[in-house]
Image: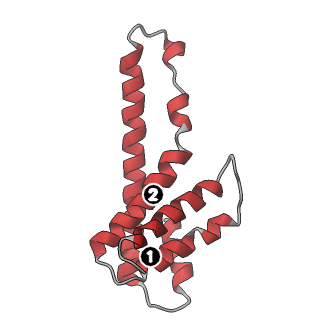
Amino acid sequence: MNKKLIFLLPILSGVLLIFSYPPYSVKFLLWLALVPLLIFINFDLTKKKIFGGDFLTGLIFSGVTTSWFLLASTVDWVGAEKKIIIILILALTWLCYVILASFFYGIVAYLFFRLRSKNWFDVFFLVSLDCL
């Protein structure tokens, strides 16, 4: 597979993860979403690219599934006069969360890459790392 096209696998994994959570809730996609990540990690890539690919998966997944946070604005509740400041604080908080959550996805991929044993048990190992 082309080295440039290989980064479509983390994007595919992020999209499959999105569809496995509400409001879509196609639960079996949760297990299928890990397959592109496993294929991506098993390619001959550097540690930095593996971290970046899984960071991209986390960015897509966390960004879309927590986008409701931007709509849950309390601007009208507090009666603030400068609503733009509160909206910017809310957007910055959301962005910090998405980046932090994506960072943990990258850490999981890096740990999996370092600790894998290249047998069928790796699937369970990846899932258990994701649960941490």
Q: Check the image and report above or below for 2 versus 20.
A: below
Give the x, y percent position of residue 83. 42, 14
SS at circle 2: helix
In front: 75, or 24? 24
Quarter of the image that includes the N terminus: bottom left
Count of residue discs? 2
In the rendered structure, the answer to whether residue 40 lies left or right of residue 20 reads left
Q: 10 Å neighbourhood of mark 1: few (<14), some, or many (≥20)?
A: many
| Foreground disc of the pair 2, 1 | 1
Q: Write down the quadrant of residue 82 in the picture.
A: top left
Amino acid of disc 1: Phe
Taking the spot 37% from the left edge, 27% from the top edge, the residue there is 89
Taking the spot 32% from the left edge, 79% from the top edge, the residue there is 45
Mark 2 or mark 1: which comes first in sequence? 1
Taking the spot 53% from the left edge, 14% from the top edge, the residue there is 76
Q: Which mark is residue 122?
A: none
Q: Identify residue for label 1.
A: 40
Q: Check the image and report above or below for 69 versus 35.
A: above
In the rendered structure, the answer to whether residue 106 lies left or right of residue 14 reads left
In front: 51, or 11? 11
Q: Write down the quadrant of residue 114 in the picture.
A: bottom left
Give the Cα distance between marks 2 and 1.
14 Å
Disc 2 and disc 1 in contact, CB within 8 angstroms: no
Q: Identify residue for label 2.
A: 58
Q: 10 Å neighbourhood of mark 2: few (<14), some, or many (≥20)?
A: many
Q: Write down the quadrant of residue 88 in the picture.
A: top left
